[in-house]
Image (tube, grey):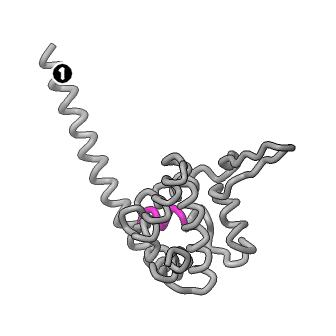
Amino acid sequence: MSTAYAATVRAQVAILTVLNTEITTMEDQVDAHFGQHPDAEVYLSQPGIGAVLGARVLAEFGDDTDRFVDAKSRRNYAGTSPITKASGTRRVVLARYARNKRLADALHQQAFAALTASHGARAFYDHHRARGATHNQALRTLSNRLVGILDGCLRHRTNYDEATAWAHRTATAA
């Protein structure tokens, strides 16, 4: 019994070793090719985005500059903008169900990583949590804001700037 278990463990270790080698090779390929894209610097300047996540977000949004009319259409495509349903006396704000799930997942990861990479993103998230939003609701709201910031950076061909991105929040707090 222990011999069979040992053989199984050795086989799994061999598989994991090969997978780790392949992952490193793929990461090197992504770094090399993504870095050549004209928008790579803009994506990499965003908080919470590295080469792999940046390449994923770029691939899902595409690089056609005329694809999205404005930030709202980019947010709608990403699925980060909320849907408001109102009837009579009741008003409900819900998460968008129809969306690009791969992109929404990547942007969710970006928002989570941005909590430690950006003081403005952290303050924005904390503000929404203090207002009663759940963790996922606050992350979705932060993700929606980050998509808008990315859209502005891409339109103006500028890198992310913490002071510019969150200036409206500090101006209202003062």
Location of the N terminus by quadrant is: top left
Residue 95 higher or lower than 147, as above or below? above
Question: Which residue: 70% across, 60% down?
Answer: 76
Number of on-image labels: 1
- Our reading of the magenta stretch's main secondary structure is helix
Front residue of this view, candidates 76 and 36? 76
Residue 96 higher or lower than 75, as above or below? above
Question: Which residue: 48% across, 79% down?
Answer: 160
Where does residue 56 sit, x and y in percent of width and height? 51, 62
Where does residue 53 sit, x and y in percent of width and height? 45, 62
Where does residue 164 sit, x and y in percent of width and height? 51, 83
Identify the magenta region.
51-57
Question: Which residue: 71% across, 67% down?
Answer: 72
- Residue positioned most to the right: 88
Front residue of this view, candidates 102 and 113? 113
Where does residue 105 sit, x and y in percent of width and height? 53, 52
Residue type at mark 1: give it.
Tyr
Question: Which residue: 48% across, 77% down?
Answer: 40
- Residue positioned most to the left: 2
Task: State yes or no: residue 56 in magenta.
Answer: yes
Which residue has dot 1 on it? 5
Query: For the residue labelled by badge 1, is the local secondary structure a helix, a strand or a loop?
Result: helix
Q: Residues within 10 Å of mark 1 (few under 14, many from 20)?
A: few
Task: State yes or no: residue 15 in magenta.
Answer: no
- Residue positioned most to the front: 174
